[in-house]
Image (cartoon, coloured by chain):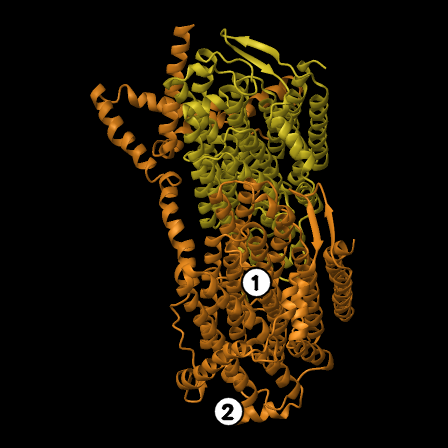
Amino acid sequence: MSPIFLLIPILFPVAGGFRLLLLKEQMEDRRRNRYSETIVCITSVLVFAALLAVRREPVMIYSFAGDFSIDFKVDGLSCLFAGMISVMWPFVMLYAFEYMQETREKNKFFAFYIMTYGVTLGVAFASNITTMYVFFEMLTLVTIPLVSYYHDHESMYAARKYAAFTIGGAGLAFITVIMTTVYGETGSFVYGGSLSINNISGIMKFAFAAGFFGFGAKAALFPLHSWLPTASAAPTPVTALLHAVAVVNSGVFAIIRLAWYVYGPEYLVDSGMQVTAILAACFTVVFAAVMALKERHFKRRLAYSTASNLSYMIFGVMLMTPEGLTAGLLHMLFHGIIKMSLFLCAGAFMHRTGNSYIYQVNGVGKRMPATFAFYTLGALSLTGIPLFCGFISKWNLVMAGIAADTALGILGVVCLIIAAFLCAMYTLSVSVRAFFPVDGTDHYGEERQEAGRLMLIPIVFFGILNILFGVFPAPIVSFIRQIAAGVL
Amino acid sequence: MLILSIVFAPFLCGILSYLIGKKSETVRDYFVILVTGAILGLTLVLYRNGPASFCIRGVLACGLSFASDGFRSVYAVITSLMWAGTALFAKEYFKEERENLNRYWFFVIVTLGATEGVMLSDDLMTAFLFFEILSFTSFTWIIHEETKAAVRAGYTYLFIAVIGGLVLFMGLALLYDAVGTLAYGELSAAVQAPLEKGKLMAAGVCILFGFGAKAGMVPVHVWLPKAHPAAPSPASALLSGILTKVGIFGILMTSMHVLAGNRTFGLLVLLLGVVTMFLGALLALFSVNLKRTLACSSMSQIGFILTGTGMMILLDSIGNEEGVVIARSGLMLHMVNHSLIKLTLFMAAGVVVMNLHTLTLDEIRGYGRNKRVLKISFLLGALGISGVPLANGYLSKTLLHEGIVEGIHHLSSCAGLLSCIEWIFLISGGFTFAYMLKLFLCVFVEKNTDPGRQALFDSVKSPGMNGASALAVFGSSLWMLILGQPAVSTRLAFRMTGFEEILHFRAFTFENLKGSFISLTIGGLVYLFVVRRFLVRGGSYVNLWPEKLDLEESVYRPVLTRILPGIFGPLAALFGENRILKPLAVLFGEKVFPSLAALFGENRLLTPAARFVMLIASILVRAMEMGTDGLIVLLRRTVVKERKVRGKPRAHPGLFRTVYTELSGAARPITSNFTFALMMTCIGIIIILCAVIYAVL
């Protein structure tokens, strides 16, 4: 199949979402749900068809101002990212149907939610930095209405902050786009980078820093991280899928493209930009973990934890070794699974009880045992306990850090271990509160009242994936190793 | 296959017992006894069969591999024996407090599988996997009663377990990176190759710390004295008897296969062991709570074992074969002895708890005066742990002592240090005798200060427990006598170590008896002149240990709860809550921009620019809302050809009017925020860059 077919999975959900906007708001829930789920499922099928069948070569859609063009291509990295989100999206849709049941303006919510899918695929399939930048900006725009969805003071503030931080970040990244395209003369993404090693100059180094922190704004990299906890004012399906996986991972994804496919390991190591990047990542890892520990709001705590974990990935990627990249990509995938399960459980708790603070969790384990059992599995996995997938990625990260044999690698590993300890404290203490309430602080009765079926299905699904990848990691690890070696 | 079923059957049975327990609690109780008994049978078969191994490739990070040899099969049997004993005892112990029992049993049985997994592991990765599982499953034992103290102890245990696990994880990663394997069999050969000794040492220290956290080694012992009193007695017996040994098992494997004969590592283990040994004994002496005393005593005995481990490594470093034999046999025997002793003692304590629901010495004083079975069992345990000749602790402690003496003779460079350690060893042994004497006399000999209470105690006829519990308590105490026979013990040591020399070890020579008698004399003196004089005031036991001297309360918790957030909190405040950025924005908004504006005259230039930027910001945020709304209405009218909505149409203020109103409201938060500055910068940069590009093109 010609790569031009890649346009179909990108445009189909955008068109499908847009049509939903035109439908009447008063339509039956069942009809809307069926419509949305169909669109998302078809898109997922299209994505997999595209990943399997499309030839691995770039196609140019449109070219402007000489050097700039909109190109698409499938390679190993986009396979991983697109494959990951296309498995997740249909399941979180189910969750959203139940979660959003009581709200108004559902057409708008689902329309933008579906459109985001297409735009994220655009980021995944982009074949040069210009295209990626365009979709990156669109991703911000299309998710703003989702963040401001509740229209209260808090979510409007969150939307403004989100817009400013990520558009501001993208503004910085714009510098990189121009610099690498015009002065660096890089075209399509090439594994190992296409920037000439002789081209180390102050301006190109600055361009990298701008791109790193600019794209990093979406990956909640310090100091542009603070939008992420604020944005958890959005409905849970948005916080879970977009602010723990799709949007924030596209930030990491963009950094990988920039570091590995535009600049290249040699360039970054020689120019010393690697040091800046790793220091920033290490700092964010520990800093965000401490902030998560301090936070009392359930979803905000998880959001800080996301910030910490995203920097794990950046650390792995910026080690600039294939092992590091493998570890970073593994953590991208596994963290997505884990954080999804944590957020979905947190959302189920909020939806069922109407509470959103950690101290209100006391004793809820008897009321929602399945939800909190899966939450605990996720928490253990995030800490890096063997048997769960989080351990596999953490093992790879630590091994890569040690194998790098530099002070930076060891520093990163130490930060990782500290953050993992803090992670156990901030995630497991919630489980302990839920299942072992101290005498007299039990807010909930014995009566069992789980979340509904539609919400439980994705929770169980991600819980199973968590264990499955933890016990049988070999196939996925070797797949990702091939991507990281540039073979796929 | 046998190994596999020993390790994994408990996991399945745990789930089964949970399901059975939902239907009938009685059936579940019998089922649990049956399962633990069956596992005991299986491990005995494993012990008879001799060496075996099994591995599963392709799962987890490095696959799973199991093997059983002398030491490991003995410990597999001890593990299942402990479980069977406590299961037998627990049926009566829990007869009144039946809350959450289903959960308790589920985790107890699963932990059995995990513990067997560690004991029968053949590489450090497998050991680590099961080690982590048992860390988390045993957490539920401590927190079982859900009281405030239990929850606090539970948190302490959990966090020590997590940090121990992570440090261990780091150690394994370092080791794997250095030598490329984690299998015990291959490690010994792999570390011979020339490699960076520093890395190996770092790995060893991390592993020591990680396993030490579970063993109760100083400085990560803080969970131990708190967790034991909080947990139900059958669980305390397991915690103290087996779970601490899991930690020792890991340290032992490291010191036998990875850092065998590394002098620095040996000294480190030795010194930590000595501190643990002495501190534990001291804490136990001061304690006025039955189970806390036993817990501190566990810590002290772990110190004895670690001291032996340290001596083993040191003697290995000078190639003294005989010394290694003695030290290794001593420490392995002491592990077995301590497991069995603590099983007896904690179950005896459990009998007291289930009848009286308290553990304070003053309140339980005189309880056991007329309970003969309990008295004999406790006495045997006390004799065993104190190292009285003919009881089981004697031989193992003598061997440990002999190991130190051997070191004094052959390690000339640190003979002075070792002589000191020998005396600390003897004094700690004396303390052991003293605190066991204190407990025994208090519970079984003295009369309660309250005559009414004593009468109440006496009215309860012997033995204060039912047949099954008596069987468990008394049966386990018989081991003190059986293993007290040197012939039996040396054979066991031979089985565990594989050294034939140990069979010829003569236990009752004058030299060996002398060490024991010095220790017991010190103990007697300490009891008479310290305990009776200072620790008993006006007929009641007092706790003289200063509250402030608690490593956890005075160091660990403050570091975590105050210092770390104290460092990062302000940083977060700077960047998260706009402490620095907001003043900056205000500075620009109120000082710099206005003065610049004044420079250009009456805000002609900059204010309109700022307003323009704000307009863009507002439009961006509202564009999706308003723009699409307008577009939708338009499309509905034209493309979909929808008729007018029935009823009165809502007044629509129009896009620009809304943006204008929005703008006046939004202006404040935007201008006073970092957002504004950032937006300005970025848009400015974009404009400049566009200009540059067009100039270049």
Q: Is residue B173 left or right of residue B570?
A: right
Where is A450 relative to A62, above or below? below
Q: Amino acid at mark 1?
A: Glu
Tag shown at residue A481: none
- Comparing B94 with A86, the one in front is B94
Q: Residue B315's x, y, as percent?
A: 51, 59
Looking at the figure, which quarter contains the C terminus of chain B?
Answer: top left
Q: How far is mark 2 from mark 1, CA to CA?
A: 56 Å
Label 1: element kind? helix
Q: Residue B460's x, y, as percent?
A: 64, 90
Classed neighbour count for the residue bearing mark 1: other residues with Cα under 10 Å, few (<14), some (14–19), many (≥20): some
Q: Chain of mark 1?
A: B
Where is A308 relative to A252, above or below? below
Q: Which chain is yellow?
A: A
Rendered image quadrant of residue B630: top right
Mark positioned earlier in the residue sequence (2 or 1)? 1
Residue that badge 2 annotates: B450
Q: Which chain is orange?
A: B
Residue that badge 1 annotates: B322
**Residue at the image position 36 percent from the left and 47 percent from the top:** B567
Q: Residue B672's x, y, as percent?
A: 34, 34
- Comparing A245 with A164, the one in front is A245
